[in-house]
Image (cartoon, rainbow, N blue to C red):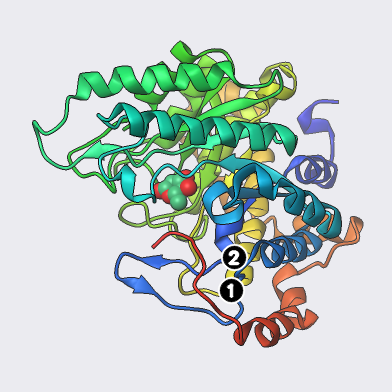
Amino acid sequence: MTQSESTPFDQAVRALDDFQIEIPSWGFANTGTRFGKFLQPAAASNLEEKFGDAAEVHRLTGATPTLALHVLWDLPRGVADIGEVQALERLSGIRAGSINPNLFQDQHYKFGSLCNPSDEIRHNALQHLLDSIEIAKRLRCRDISLWLADGSNYPGTQSIRKRIEWLQSALNAAHAHLGPDQRLLVEYKPFEPAFYHTDIADWGMSSQLCRAAGPQAYVLVDTGHHYLSQNIEQIVAWLLHLDLLGGFHFNDRRYADDDLTLGSIDPYQIFRIFHEICEDHQTRKSNGRLHTVPFMIDQSHNLKGKIEATVQTVVTSQELWLKAALVDREHLAELQQSCNLVAAEELFRGAFWRDVRPLVAAWREARGLAADPLKALRESGYLERITRERASRQSAVSSYA
Ligand code: RM4
Ligand code: MN
Ligand code: MN
């Protein structure tokens, strides 16, 4: 059956059944800006609470079966904490998702981690990366998501060339430790915390590092990690073309790496990215498990309630995904081929403006989920309960800022 022969509801069911998005454990913890943290009484302050919140989001949305973990924040004792994670997986029904090494918070990373001029610090950083791969292996997690804060603040203060070599040899060594089902995802970011040069500043550098490291290394695209007005969907199209797209960290921003909720500033951008993915799904045969592109959320909910913000994000992503899935790509291809510009743009824009919320609600009801997850969250009493339980024991929790 072609896309035009099935009903919109059938198409919606297929698109939404297929759609999953990974939520981050740090999205439930107290986070802040470099100016400080505002604590929320309902914030999760241990791993059990993070898994509990993740399970609540999954119960409400049906789309978030996995939770991304940050090693230092969630498994501070490394492999020794694996048993606790496994117990929480069983208890909550949520699986551990991508494993994020933390190579940016320890004091000795002041001048970098895998690119630090000190042999000893580079060695320790690599060891942490290898430990993270081991953690992922034992938890049966496919992906290790690597983000480095490495870079420098002033011209002439570091050898950019030497740092490339150090970085490449570390990634090669990490790649050699991957299990056959594992992948190393390499994230890029043009600036912050370093403001002169960042060692993995863009998708070109990340792609090159991945290609040289080996076939199980892929590029991770964090939507907040681009210069303003950069055409992210074009980068996505290129990475798909090169078979190097490893996954996404979704969030939105107005200025820099703002980590605002997905689609809050520019929903059209997420729609355009999803369109590229949908087009790719339709045109290529599956390459097997190693190649499926995971959608992940990387957000910091400083002002909004954390669970509400997460549910809102998941709901928005489902709506934008469905809009993109319903683009009539056969017709669009004809219009593109004949350079019928206005009609092509109107078809594309029309899909974006289409109100798919009734279709998403119908899918939810068909799947036994709440038609309106945010309303269901408010009515569930969950927020009141965790606020009561957690308010008295808000302690310092490790997370960023
Ligand atoms: C970075 C990057 C990473 C995330 C850290 C906390 O900007 O997006 O993915 O782990 O923030
Ligand atoms: Mn990220
Ligand atoms: Mn970021």
Crowdedness of circle 1 by 10 Å Cα count: few (<14), some, many (20+)? many
**Where in the figure is residue 14, as x and y percent of width and height?**
81, 40
- Tag 2's secondary structure? helix
Above or below, 209 against 130 in this view is above
Above or below, 314 against 175 in this view is below
Number of on-image labels = 2
Above or below, 374 against 1 in this view is below
Crowdedness of circle 2 by 10 Å Cα count: few (<14), some, many (20+)? many
Judging by the rendered image, the residue that carries numbered circle 1 is 43
Residue at 74% x, 39% y is 139
Above or below, 171 against 63 in this view is above
Residue at 29% x, 42% y is 227
Going from N to C along the chain, the mark reached first, 2 or 1, is 2
Alpha-carbon span between mark 2 and mark 1: 6 Å
The numbered dot on residue 28 is 2
Based on the displayed image, in which of its 4 quarters is residue 111 positioned? top left
Residue 85 seen in the figure: yes
Q: Amino acid at mark 2?
A: Phe
